[in-house]
Image (cartoon, rainbow, N blue to C red):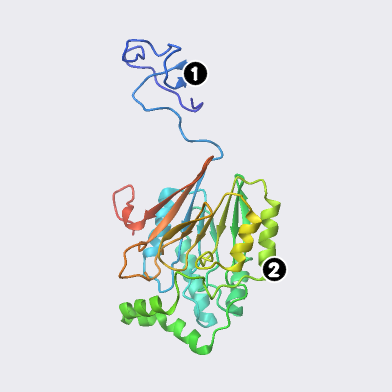
Amino acid sequence: MNPHLALGDPADGGVTDAGGHDGHDSHDSHDSHDGANVRGPWTHLRIADDPDRFSFALISDRTGIARPGVFERGIAALNLLRPAFAIQLGDLIEGYADDDEVAAGWDEVDRILAPLDAPLFLVPGNHDVFDAASRDRWLSRHGRLHHHFRYKDVLFLVLDCQDPPPELSPRAREALANLPGYAARDPEAVRRMVETSIDWEGTQTMAALSEEQIAWAEGVIAENADVRWTFVLMHMPLWQGEGHPAVHRIRTALGGRPHTMFAGHVHNYKAVDIDGNTHIRLGPTGGLWVKPHDDTGNFDHITWITMEADGPHIANVTLEGLRDAQGRPLA
């Protein structure tokens, strides 16, 4: 029986079961209250409020051609649902622009994130860190790229998939910088072009993780061998295709430890099981849908994870399915 639950006195002066026994019969099979068995209009009294239980949320790509207002609805959803904390999986700004536009993009993100009540941990995406200058700006604003934290004996390992950032030709930079404008004029043409230009189901060829970062991750895993679960968070789903070498090394370091990996980047939801561990590629929270002719995985959402004794319980909350306390759609 939960020590914080106090059952009121029954209106008829006694709690009885269908056979007429009072609730203090030691043979009653129902939950105990203050040392006595109690029967009542409830299924059971095993309330899930273990102190090691907690919930956190993931929010995914805002950009890669942001659709106005969608990410803002994601922030409003987090404020309604009240997670202990949230993690954003990268691509907050459009990027691939000159320094003034990048600075303006981050100022816009600051305004969007200002209403968020929960702590928010950031994962760098390829639109956020795309060259040396944008990397320096990230570091000046956020202090670090790859990082880790531990909460209630659960390890959160955040990877940087742009380490180092790719060397793009001026022509490629210009094309990426112009994509939002093209999308505003002809969104279907841009969707088709984006879909066909990248092997979305394969290993992400733009991804890079330095030897220093991989060794750091291996060290963090070794130093936190006593955790009950490990979450590995990255922008690009490095487990796809043959798998990025960094993921193979991280899996080796984890050994048989239970873990879950999350990524964004593709703007299309897909969950797979690899060696008994769940790997989830999130859909977007405002970024362009990349599979317009296949509804599978196409939805804007946040991902809600409740950590319990038997592991994480994962739910996806689509933004169009939430309304506030007055019954209004999220603005």
The foreground one among 139 and 167 is: 167
Where is residue 96 shown, x and y percent of the image?
50, 80
Residue appearing at x 48%, y 70% in the figure = 202
Report the residue that reaches farthest toward the left: 327
| Dot 2 or dot 1, earlier in sequence | 1
Where is residue 136 shown, x and y percent of the image?
62, 75
Residue appearing at x 70%, y 58% in the figure = 219
Q: Which residue is disc 1 drawn over?
A: 34
Q: Amino acid at mark 2?
A: Glu
Left or right for 153, reference 194: right
Q: Amino acid at mark 1?
A: Asp
Residue 234 lies in what quarter of the image?
Answer: bottom right
* Few, some or many residues within 10 Å of mark 1 (<14, 14–19, 20+): few
- Residue 116 visible? The answer is no
**Residue at mark 2 to residue at mark 1: CA–CA distance:** 57 Å
The foreground one among 294 and 161 is: 294
Left or right for 117, reference 296: right
SS for tag 2? helix
Numbered disc in front, either 2 or 1: 2
Q: Which residue is disc 2 drawn over?
A: 212
Where is residue 50 shown, x and y percent of the image?
53, 36
**Quadrant containing the C terminus in the rendered view:** bottom left
Label 1 near label 2: C-beta < 8 Å?
no
Residue appearing at x 36%, y 21% in the figure = 40
Report the residue that reaches farthest toward the bottom: 171
SS for tag 1? loop
* Disc sitting over residue 289 in the figure: none
Residue appearing at x 50%, y 66% in the figure = 240
Where is residue 316 shown, x and y percent of the image?
40, 53
